[in-house]
Amino acid sequence: MSSSPDISQEVRELLGSSIAWLFWSREASSRFVLRAAHGFGNQNIETLQREWTGHADLLEQCLEAGKPLRAEARTSSADTTASAVELIAIPLSTENQTGVLELCFTSAEGAAQFLQSEQLNAINASGPRWLRQISAGSSPTSQPESPLLRELNRIRESTPAAECMQAYLDELIVLRAADRCSLVSRRGTTARILAVSGAASPSARSQVIRSLRSLAGALPAQHAGAPSQLSAADLTVHGLSAQSASVYVVQSGADVRRPELLLIAEHFQGESTSGTSEFERQFPLWQLVLAGAAGLRPARVAGRFWNWKSGLAAAAVVAIGFIPVPFTITASGELVPVERQNVYAPEQGLIRGEDLQLPPDGHVASGEVVLRITSPELQRRVSEVEGEIATVSEQIRSLRNTRSGLERTSNEERTVDLDVGIRLAELTARLAGFQAEKQLLNSRLESLEVRSPIEGEVLTWDASRILKDRPVERGQLLLTVGDPEGSWEGIVHIRDVDLQFARQNLAEEGSVHLSAAANAQLKWTGQSVQLAGVVETDPSGRASAPASIAVSDVDPDQVRPGMRIEARFDCGTAPLFFVLFRGPIETLRSYLWW
């Protein structure tokens, strides 16, 4: 029934004979063609193709979804009875072909169990190979590939490229072509063992490898055709214990650009059967496979990595590493006017939107009111002090009205109201205190009108949005006002690991190259660098020291206050290794106190 016996056999081995299935491939015309089937009696492919054509929609949906889809179908037999069938469509794809494996279950439980089984993963792994096998033929009735080619393809797909040659040689042992096989690359008398059966990583110090290399180097020039036969005596000279060996030419060395590839097949049980073995009949296929594996990724023999070429390359790398190259350090910061002052909140309060008086152009005069702060707490205290002053004043007036006009002493036989005098003195002192506090509160109220300390421009970016309807604390920074028409300076932060090199630059050069971070065309030369003597730590934990760099020739029309800049300190020259790997070197120095 199946037009592809190999696919049918593999799927039956994978799923068992109790599950019915259909294997579809989609042609370039988007038509689905039935390639193989199982479980439908003696019906041929053409009959099944016609009967199942209506499932093209399910197949198309499965390929579009890229995952297995489950559906329910109804089937009918000769006695007109209908039964439900559960269908599972599994998408399969390669680089240039797509297909679907459709499974039929007689119960929903069976379909559910299959979707949870490992068989689904096995189908996903083998499906692309089935599609490639189909694409190799011109029609559903094309002949399948040979079992040997199928096995070699399986080895190639499931084995890493670096291990393919050794896997192929192991397959030769399984097929009883020899007892030990070696693939040799040879140029003249210099031979290199690429792979040996049964040895995943052949070591150059191994006696067997050295013996095989000695044998390959001593062999005469080989020609394609019948293999060369070696006797036990020929092998013993090179320290090999095989009874006989056959040497096959896998790749001729006639082309100087390619080395000669030889396959040495050793036999430990007796004479070889050259000319009659199945292996020699299939040798053209083995030639292609072994030559392709050797050309794709030649195997390296352990222990042969270091040679004079490697040593020369390492010496060149070390020499290049000590070549002196320009050494610079960089620091980022901002460009600001030298004449600038910060404006802080004099009291705790609220800045209402209508109390902001920032000019649209940002230019302010010295002493100009820029904003007002509303302080309910301060106003409440002013009201309380005014009430206290009124109360004490009324008490003083009352005492003075009730006090007698004369104070008499004892000698003059006059009476003195000492209590009233003391009380009056206390109230007078309290009144003076409240008046002094009111004067202080009035000055604080006046300070709620925040004025510009200098003539210039508001440097704070989008100050209106930042301050509008915002509560502020006493001492909080509100604005920065500067004069952009005057001198400019760059404030940069130098990393703590770069401080020693920055000081070296200041001692030798004294100048710093500056450029705008957003426009590399804007460049300046900075002088008179002042480096802070303390190291600060930012919120991210990075330590740096601020530095002030005087900048000349700044055009106010091309820059704006707060523009990000990059500073470059030229620190002379240093070895290339140090410039590239300064971080690890400095870390090593810190551990070794060097």
Image (cartoon, grey):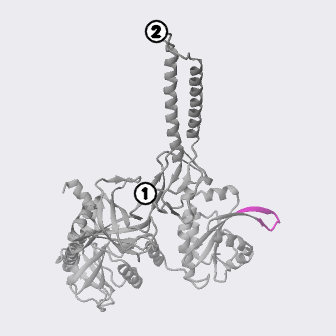
| Magenta-drawn stretch contains 437 | no
- Whether residue 262 is visible: yes
Report which residue position mark 2 lands on: 412
Residue 592 point in image, percent of width and height: 20, 55
Along the viewing direction, whichever of 269 and 208 lies nearer the viewer:
208
Q: Residues within 10 Å of mark 2 (few under 14, many from 20)?
A: few
| Residue 466 shown left or right of residue 527 in the figure | right
| Magenta-drawn stretch contains 80 | yes
The relative height of residue 21 versus residue 391 in the rendered view (above or below) is: below
- Whether residue 241 is visible: no
Residue 238 point in image, percent of width and height: 18, 77
Badge 2 marks a residue whose secondary structure is: loop
Q: Residue at the location (49% across, 48% down)?
A: 345
Instruction: Name the amino acid, label 1.
Output: Gln
Residue 249 point in image, percent of width and height: 32, 85
Magenta stretch in the rendered image = 74-86
